[in-house]
Amino acid sequence: MRTPKTLKIAEIQARRIAVDWESLGYNITRCHTFNVTICYHYFRGHNESKADCLDMDPKAPQHVVNHLPPYTNVSLKMILTNPEGRKESEETIIQTDEDVPGPVPAKSLKGTPFEDKIFLNWKEPMDPNGIITQYEYRVKCLYGQLTGIWGIDYILDSYPEVFVFLQS
């Protein structure tokens, strides 16, 4: 039996990776019965890590590893076993795509009112799921007679605070 070639990444998404491998036949396995296993592991912030091995259909040339965290380096390898022994492919390290960030903690939202503006600040989301490059906020008048166009504004940096200027 020879060592399987490196896994090929067929598709990368925020929470899943599809992997391909070469067709496994007698010329590679030297046996008619064999098992294929995909093993993966990752480390993430907040001391989160996971390692698992998934048994594959030996005849299928592709498999999807699901339930992965976004924007995380994942290490993958294929293990080929038969009655004569075990061979492992080289590890392939791939990063999952970014995803929509989790919510900003509601208790972290603070506002300081001034006569013509409000200063808002908040903490970053617990799960940023990538690099935050801007925040979106909405302003809605609940009391009084404020007029003007109210809607969505953008902050072009990743610092979680803003002055909202009010017009009457």
Image (tube, rainbow, N blue to C red):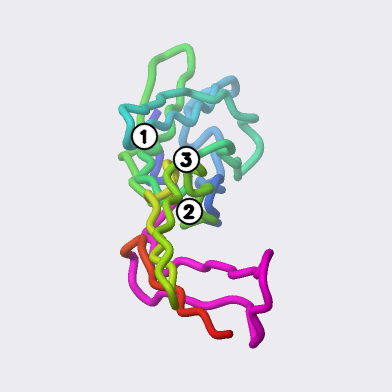
Amino acid at pointer 1: Tyr
The stretch in magenta equals 129-158
Q: Earlier in the sequence, mark 1 or mark 2?
A: 2
Q: Earlier in the sequence, mark 3 or mark 1?
A: 1
Q: Is residue 79 above or below residue 20?
A: above
Name the residue rendered at 53%, 52% in the picture: 14
User: Does the magenta run of residues contain 104?
Assistant: no
Label tally: 3
Front: mark 3 or 1? 3
Amino acid at pointer 3: Lys
Res. 107 mark: 3
Q: Which secondary structure lies at badge 3?
A: helix
Residue nearer the viewer, 41 or 168: 168
Dominant secondary-structure state across the stretch colored magenta: loop
Front: mark 2 or 3? 3
Q: Which secondary structure lies at badge 1?
A: strand
Where residue 34 sits, quadrant-wise, is: top right
Res. 42 mark: 1
Front: mark 1 or 2? 1
Q: Residue 55: give x, y in percent of width and height.
A: 57, 23
Res. 9 mark: 2
Q: Which quadrant of the figure contains the N terminus?
A: top left
Q: Residues within 10 Å of mark 2 (few under 14, many from 20)?
A: some
Name the residue rendered at 65%, 30% in the picture: 57
